[in-house]
Amino acid sequence: MSDIMSGIDVLVSEVGPRDGLQSIKSIMPTDAKKNWIKAMSDAGIREIEVGSFVPAKLLPQLADTGEIVQYARTIPGLQVAALVPNAKGAEAAIAAGAHKITLPLSVSETHSLKNLRKTHEQVFEEVKAIVALLKALPKDKRPHFEGSLSTAFGCTLEGYIPEAQVVKLGERLMALGCDEVGLADTTGYANPAQVKHMIKAIWAALGKNALTGIHIHNTRGLGLANALAALDIGITTFDSSLGGLGGCPFAPGASGNIVTEDLVFMLDSMGLKTGIDLAKLLKVREIVTAAVPDPMYGFTPDAGVPKGYIQGGNGWGIGNDTKLAAE
Amino acid sequence: MSDIMSGIDVLVSEVGPRDGLQSIKSIMPTDAKKNWIKAMSDAGIREIEVGSFVPAKLLPQLADTGEIVQYARTIPGLQVAALVPNAKGAEAAIAAGAHKITLPLSVSETHSLKNLRKTHEQVFEEVKAIVALLKALPKDKRPHFEGSLSTAFGCTLEGYIPEAQVVKLGERLMALGCDEVGLADTTGYANPAQVKHMIKAIWAALGKNALTGIHIHNTRGLGLANALAALDIGITTFDSSLGGLGGCPFAPGASGNIVTEDLVFMLDSMGLKTGIDLAKLLKVREIVTAAVPDPMYGFTPDAGVPKGYIQGGNGWGIGNDTKLAAE
């Protein structure tokens, strides 16, 4: 999947089927999940986190993740990602054929104990076991392994998280053999200045290739501003959830991911290539709303695109007057 | 009011009593308006657009603007702004004692005809008449006169608005004697790249002093991202509305201003000085909700500030680990 960025500037990684569904009580039928994922891919989404390999008794909403990964793997051009809380989950993800596995490490150890029921050292043991699993595979069969630094911008339980602690844990993850680290604002505490500062600190310690993506929540309404800050300094992958469905059920007060539709509108209107057809994307909401009763959010879905808006153009109003005026 | 920026980095200019109230059907009692304005000032808001001098039959919600301006003038340290659609309105605003008057010029002439019922040339005639009024006053009695370029980022009626047209009308406003121009995304069409591009174009034509503020709507969820883009290149004044109350009733599909509470949280968490006490600001919502039944928006009011958050500090997580860790 090395060509995942081919022809695009920004990768929008849909996490609704995982982060969205894990945070609502409703259980989406497996067929609806498949339709959702297929429709997202048809709309141009190139990467989807389709589920999480956690025990079904903890998250019954995601009990069919194995089947969903197997199905998603049959969709051409789609990078299939899955969350794994431990080596056992990674084993299941590998068996199902995930292209990418993400293990969350809560920078807040208090949150780690609540979320994964593990200390940092216990999580590192899982990382080691996963790396051993991966090394036993032929290179072309190894999924990409990301260690995601969650609660990196603050924690609803611990409060402020020192940047140095985020960097230190990131260094450890890379030293243990992760291919990449991720940065996650699990609690919606981040601000644009902090986002830039944190990314630069991680890049300074680990190099730019070690961090290309960010996972942002919109809890305090700063989601797209934080995305813009990350974009401004060179982050190219953004997690988001269709209709903003989701959030972390183990972080009290946390609410949903940034809204895929609004994110895509922002990027597209800035003249950045996402490969995504916004009109098709907006239609996908119907599949989700037909399958679960939970509310979906988003401003662009309500307001629609601007009058005369040209999707996939060179941006709206950015020195392209001639082109747009000719319409 | 030349010291309005003293001790602060960013001026948050509250427009709820004008832009908010003009867009809802409810009529807020005059006393409630006074309480609202006083409480906003007590929370540290330094500039409030308190009303609009339009005929009462057009906007009965704002029929008491004269009385409100007179009252607001008694609040020490508050810059009192008012919207004026024409010279007659400006006369009333001057009589009431407004520190600042803003005349909106819709860059979209179609919108201008709908909103002010005037062509561009007819609006320029009003500008000339207002400048004549101002010149007849002693210098220390002259309100600051802003010509606000509305629908600058696109129009729900005309669609795309060429940047060159915005610049040209801005040049004309300054040539006729405005002290400053403003940029207003009346329709919520702007994107961060366009915001930067447009501001730079105006600065290139008119100089940096001719444009210091921006008026953003959050129609497509990009409001704070657009504010961040403007902030990044040096805009220092941001219009916003408490609870996002408001919008433009004459621009179909347009919805509310950016939310003051979320804007202040963003700026404060970035370590920028606004002079505003966020906790007090959040309390002010009670005055508005007690006076009108209309919904108020905002994420920060729902979520609260992060655990351990220090208001008015050096920012959240921006190289200030020691200070925050010590708490």
Image (cartoon, coloured by chain):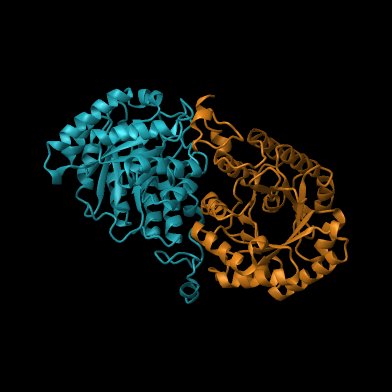
Chain colours: A cyan, B orange
Q: Quadrant of the C terminus of chain B?
A: top right
The answer to whether A135 appears left or right of A243 in the picture is left
Q: Position of residue B189 (x, y in %)?
A: 54, 60
Q: Position of residue A56 (x, y in %)?
A: 27, 29
Residue A25 visible in the picture: no
Q: Residue placed at 48% from the left, 39% from the top? A: A190
Q: Is residue B298 above or below residue A263?
A: above
The answer to whether B162 appears left or right of B87 in the picture is left
Residue A285 visible in the picture: yes
Res A32 → quadrant? top left
Q: Position of residue A2 (x, y in %)?
A: 23, 53
The answer to whether B248 appears left or right of A48 in the picture is right
Q: Position of residue A11 (x, y in %)?
A: 34, 52
Q: Is residue A323 above or below residue A73?
A: below
Q: Is residue B238 or residue A326 the one in the foreground?
A: B238
Q: Is residue A40 or residue A153 the one in the foreground?
A: A153
The answer to whether B310 appears left or right of A136 in the picture is right
Res A102 → quadrant? top left
